[in-house]
């Protein structure tokens, strides 16, 4: 089986970029002698085409297509949906025509069924995982990174992309929320982020530095209203750092009792929970990228042996069945 993997988002700094890089490396580590994976967004002369983002979904493909959906937050915000106009409808139609759709949680699977009317039988839940680089770092490593980046000795941490404002992340509100500990924001930042009051910006950092920043933080704060998985929370736990987050379905599913979850929108409660956190944090989920890769290879096999009508479009079901996790 020859698989074409659309690696275009691998250079991105967001969660989709992280997913693409980590999964592709794991797919290469777990490939069998009879299979092959090629980095290309042209599915010619291949058996299966996998695009790890909605932007790569094709309306017409010469082979079975697998699409990874990370979340459907834009569909829940009418203003965003109207602003993007016709383009999303074409992307959504391309996803609806995919042979198989991979999502990171059952929460996203439920959204895909409700918002895109996807057949649950085509949806495969495959969780994400922390990269092996994310592990507790030594005091010396933490101190070196702290001095080089001029970080405070104790701090709350947020990690993500800040190139443009995103109302779902509540970063401006978080920055202005009263707190005892300083706030460090890690990630590529646009001009607007430099105007946030009372925060320390690191810019984009290497995974080695990020692991030390995670390890040195008092807690990670996750004030997002919409999360498809919460990868930064899992990375923080892998580095031994507690997590405080808004109580959203995907985070509840992934983190369980491993994080302190507060009422969505209550930033004061979120900050208080983060400042009251105690180390060491609970262990992260045991799922690895190799587990995800092996589950993804099984999806490719099922896509290759699809029924003749698998790519026709959406099928409406009278009774929707729950979606399970691929192991």
Image (spheres, rainbow, N blue to C red):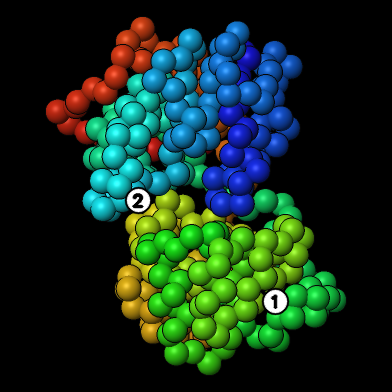
Q: Measured from the top left, where is residue 55 in percent x and y?
A: 46, 34
Q: Secondary structure at mark 2?
A: helix
Toward which corner of the image does residue 117 lie, by quadrant? Answer: top left
Query: Horizontally, is 317 left or right of 45 in the view?
Result: left
Residue at point 29%, 39% (across, down):
85
* Image quarter of the N terminus: top right
Q: Measured from the top left, where is residue 267 in percent x and y?
A: 38, 79
Label 1 packing within 10 angstroms: few (<14), some (14-19), many (20+):
many
Q: Which mark is residue 216?
A: 1
For the residues bearing labels 1 and 2, Cβ distance under 8 angstroms: no
Toward which corner of the image does residue 139 lie, by quadrant? Answer: bottom right
Work out whether residue 273 can be spotted: no
Label 2 packing within 10 angstroms: few (<14), some (14-19), many (20+):
some
Residue at point 55%, 50% (across, down):
15
Residue at point 56%, 16% (across, down):
43
Depth check, front residue: 194 or 266:
194
Furthest-front residue in this view: 191
Q: Relative to 76, is 120 above or below?
A: above
> Separation of disc 1 and disc 2 at Cα?
31 Å
Residue at point 61%, 34% (across, down):
8
Circle count: 2
Q: Which residue is mark 2?
A: 73
Q: Secondary structure at mark 1?
A: helix
Query: Horizontally, is 305 left or right of 158 in the view?
Result: left
Depth check, front residue: 96 or 139:
96
Query: Horizontally, is 48 left or right of 168 in the view?
Result: right
Q: Which mark is residue 136?
A: none
Q: Measured from the top left, where is residue 6 in percent x and y?
A: 58, 29
Q: Measured from the top left, where is residue 182 in percent x and y?
A: 58, 86
Q: Relative to 226, is 308 above or below?
A: above
Furthest-bottom residue in this view: 180
Q: Relative to 286, is 97 above or below?
A: above
């Amino acid at each position: 089986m020859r698989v074409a993997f659309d690696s275009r988002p691998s250079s991105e700094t967001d969660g989709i970029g992280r997913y693409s890089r980590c999964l592709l490396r794991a797919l290469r580590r777990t490939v069998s002698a009879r299979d092959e994976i090629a980095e290309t967004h042209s599915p010619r002369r291949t058996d299966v085409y996998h695009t790890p983002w909605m932007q790569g979904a094709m309306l017409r493909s010469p082979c079975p297509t697998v699409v990874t959906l990370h979340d459907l937050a834009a569909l829940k915000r009418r203003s965003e949906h109207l602003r993007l106009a016709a383009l999303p409808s074409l992307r959504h139609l391309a996803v609806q025509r995919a042979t198989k759709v991979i999502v990171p949680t059952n929460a996203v699977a439920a959204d895909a069924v409700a918002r895109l009317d996807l057949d649950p039988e085509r949806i495969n839940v495959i969780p994400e995982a922390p990269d092996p680089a994310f592990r507790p770092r030594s005091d010396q490593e933490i101190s070196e990174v702290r001095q080089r980046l001029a970080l405070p000795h104790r701090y709350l941490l947020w990690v993500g992309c800040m190139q443009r404002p995103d109302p779902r992340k509540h970063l401006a509100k978080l920055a202005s929320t009263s707190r005892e500990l300083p706030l460090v924001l890690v990630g590529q930042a646009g001009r607007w982020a430099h105007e946030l009051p009372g925060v320390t910006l690191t810019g984009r950092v290497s995974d080695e530095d990020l692991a030390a920043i995670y390890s040195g933080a008092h807690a990670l704060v996750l004030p997002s209203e919409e999360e498809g998985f919460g990868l930064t929370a899992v990375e923080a736990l892998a580095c031994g750092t507690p997590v405080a987050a808004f109580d959203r379905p995907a985070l509840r599913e992934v983190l369980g009792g491993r994080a302190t979850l507060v009422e969505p929108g209550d930033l004061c409660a979120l900050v208080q929970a983060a400042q009251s956190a105690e180390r060491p944090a609970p262990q992260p989920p045991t799922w690895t990228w190799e587990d995800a890769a092996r589950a993804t290879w099984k999806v490719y096999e099922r896509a290759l042996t699809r029924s003749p009508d698998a790519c026709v479009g959406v099928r409406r079901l009278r009774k929707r069945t729950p979606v399970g996790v691929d192991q």
